[in-house]
Image: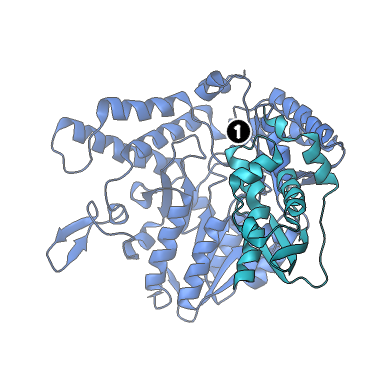
Chain colours: A blue, B cyan
């Protein structure tokens, strides 16, 4: 067991478990599990207007959690909105942006009159595709896609043509959840900014692997989930530039987000509370901050180095197998997609599961991408700091067993 | 033990499926996809006197869905349509003779769902 693995009780409770599905959801370290348990067992109270010690403590911790997460991505505290997950963050944006586009004119933030195109990439997860399809249908906007090359990377030359004066929104993934491709988001954001478009980054697959600095990226919005970065399920983040968030209307209405209410009308709180209607996932936010602290304690650079070494080791081993097709970009994160000739992904996954090896099989919520590649799906392994070279050796052994069962 | 589902008869049918291909003049056809994996199966049938005279399936899929399609298409040839419409999950599990986990049940049932979809067209 490596030193990181010891931090994750799931491995102690499931001896022999080889977990290679961290892009789907990561395992949780002890401090995160403890924070959840401590909150409900020792600190549970609702936040904001409770003038008693328990509530004040919960409020303080909730605010501190926001601060911790803001610092982690170099944002200001009130630029962090808590949501349910990446999907909800994107839906929040697609819902509130349609209220103000295309009539919105702001010399500082952008010029949207006459703009009616949304630029995505061909490698988006359904969660950064379907909300924009709905947006486009309702508002008579056009969707455009930056294509992928035969190397499973974005075509940056084509992007220069696709991002134009008509581009209202650029919404792109930082890292492909299928191939692990690390996209040059700084470049694409700068192209979009030249055209005065709104820029949105889906960081669901990157925030746990790479240092995210929203100021350096220069994007207007960035979204991610807590559960893929060692945090609990049911808590996510929407980062937005203050000047944007202030201009946007609320997403949902109710308690927790109002300034004053009469029977006829209401005024709303400032950011970030304006976007947090109803009782929030307080324990989720507090324990997500613990996940951030856990990453910061190890240091993201160290995580990156460790995972790169494991990636190189894994690729070398996978390449030595006969009858395997690998889908490899040049700049790759901790995600690898492959197929075994003549064996369906579900069958691969099922037989590996017999050896306690967990991988993901299928279209990975990227159906249009699979169609473009003319494949049913892929087998995907994705790892994290708790994985080891021994895990990979067991995987390779497992893959050979799959081939044996199918007589390959 | 998961490997029990990859019994010889299942793997044999995966490699050498029965009734796989296309019919020239099908009376009815229907496609059904499995949203979990994106697999799609197409069923084509020729009916005669309220019975299935001929049937073919096409589409890529896992060993379970492909074996289920082979066995089911064999089973329902010459079966009265009424009887086919009453086939259910238990009939498929009994036919396959392998333990199917919760996540794979959709694979096993995909061919039956597609056939029932085709039969809906017959009724209409």
Q: Is residue B47 above or below residue A58?
A: below
Q: Position of residue B76 (x, y in %)?
A: 72, 55
Which chain is mark 1 on?
Answer: A
**Residue that extends furthest to the front in the rendered view of this protein:** B49
Q: Position of residue B24 (x, y in %)?
A: 83, 71
Q: Is residue B38 visible?
A: no
Q: Position of residue B18 (x, y in %)?
A: 82, 52
Q: Position of residue A71 (x, y in %)?
A: 41, 41
Name the foreground residue: A207 vs A95. Answer: A95
Name the foreground residue: B53 vs B101. Answer: B53
Q: Residues within 10 Å of mark 1 (few under 14, many from 20)?
A: many
Name the foreground residue: A359 vs A355. Answer: A355
In the image, B104: left or right of A137? right
Q: Is residue A162 visible?
A: yes
Q: Return the residue at label 1.
A: A384
In the image, A59: left or right of A391? left
Name the foreground residue: B4 vs B76. Answer: B76
For the point 56% across and 57% down, the residue is A126
Question: Which corner quadrant of the image does residue A356 belong to?
Answer: top right
For the point 47% across and 53% down, the residue is A87
In the image, A199: left or right of B50? left
Label 1: element kind = loop
Q: Is residue A353 above or below residue A76?
A: above
For the N terminus of chain A, the image quarter is top right
Q: Is residue A249 above or below residue A6?
A: below
């Amino acid at each position: 067991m490596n030193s990181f693995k010891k931090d994750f009780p799931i491995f102690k409770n499931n001896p022999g478990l080889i977990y290679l599905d961290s892009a789907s959801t990561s395992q949780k370290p002890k401090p995160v599990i403890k924070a959840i348990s401590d909150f409900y067992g020792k600190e549970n109270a609702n936040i904001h207007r409770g003038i008693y010690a328990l509530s004040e403590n919960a409020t303080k911790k909730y605010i501190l959690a926001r601060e911790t997460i803001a610092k982690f991505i170099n944002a200001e505290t009130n630029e962090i909105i808590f949501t349910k997950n990446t999907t909800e963050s994107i839906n929040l944006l697609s819902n509130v942006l349609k209220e103000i586009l295309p009539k919105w004119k702001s010399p500082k933030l952008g010029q949207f009159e006459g703009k009616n195109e949304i630029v995505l990439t061909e490698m988006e997860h359904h969660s950064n595709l379907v909300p924009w399809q709905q947006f486009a249908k309702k508002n008579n906007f056009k969707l455009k896609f930056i294509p992928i090359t035969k190397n499973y990377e974005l075509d940056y030359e084509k992007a220069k043509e696709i991002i134009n004066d008509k581009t209202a929104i650029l919404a792109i993934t930082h890292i492909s959840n299928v191939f692990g491709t690390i996209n040059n988001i700084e470049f694409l954001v700068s192209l979009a900014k030249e055209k005065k478009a709104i820029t949105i980054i889906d960081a669901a697959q990157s925030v746990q692997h790479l240092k995210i600095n929203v100021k350096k990226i220069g994007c207007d919005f960035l979204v991610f989930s807590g559960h893929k970065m060692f945090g609990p399920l049911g808590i996510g983040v929407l980062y937005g530039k203050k000047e944007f968030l202030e201009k946007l209307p609320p997403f949902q209405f109710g308690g927790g987000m109002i300034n004053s209410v009469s029977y006829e009308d209401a005024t709303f709180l400032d950011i970030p509370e304006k976007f947090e209607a109803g009782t929030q996932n307080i324990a989720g936010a507090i324990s997500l901050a613990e996940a951030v602290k856990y990453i910061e304690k190890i240091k993201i650079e160290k995580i990156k180095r460790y995972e790169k070494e494991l990636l190189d080791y894994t690729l070398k081993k996978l390449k030595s197998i006969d009858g395997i097709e690998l889908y490899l970009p040049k700049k790759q994160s901790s995600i690898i997609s492959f197929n075994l000739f003549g064996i369906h992904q579900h069958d691969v996954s099922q037989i590996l599961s017999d050896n306690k090896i967990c991988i993901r099989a299928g279209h990975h919520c990227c159906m249009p991408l699979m169609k473009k590649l003319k494949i049913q799906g892929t087998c995907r392994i994705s790892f994290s700091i708790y994985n080891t070279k021994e895990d990979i050796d067991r995987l390779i052994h497992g893959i050979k067993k799959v081939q044996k069962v199918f007589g390959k | 033990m998961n490997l029990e589902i990859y019994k010889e008869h299942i793997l044999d049918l995966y490699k050498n499926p029965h009734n796989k291909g296309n019919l020239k003049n099908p009376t009815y056809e229907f496609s059904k996809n499995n949203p979990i994996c994106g697999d799609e199966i197409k069923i084509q049938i020729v009916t005669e006197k309220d019975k299935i005279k001929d049937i073919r399936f096409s589409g890529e899929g896992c060993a379970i869905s492909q074996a289920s399609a082979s066995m089911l298409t064999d089973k329902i040839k010459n079966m009265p349509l009424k009887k086919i419409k009453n086939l259910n999950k238990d009939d498929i599990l009994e036919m396959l003779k392998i333990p199917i986990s919760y996540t794979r049940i959709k694979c096993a049932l995909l061919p039956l769902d597609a056939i029932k979809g085709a039969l809906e067209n017959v009724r209409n």
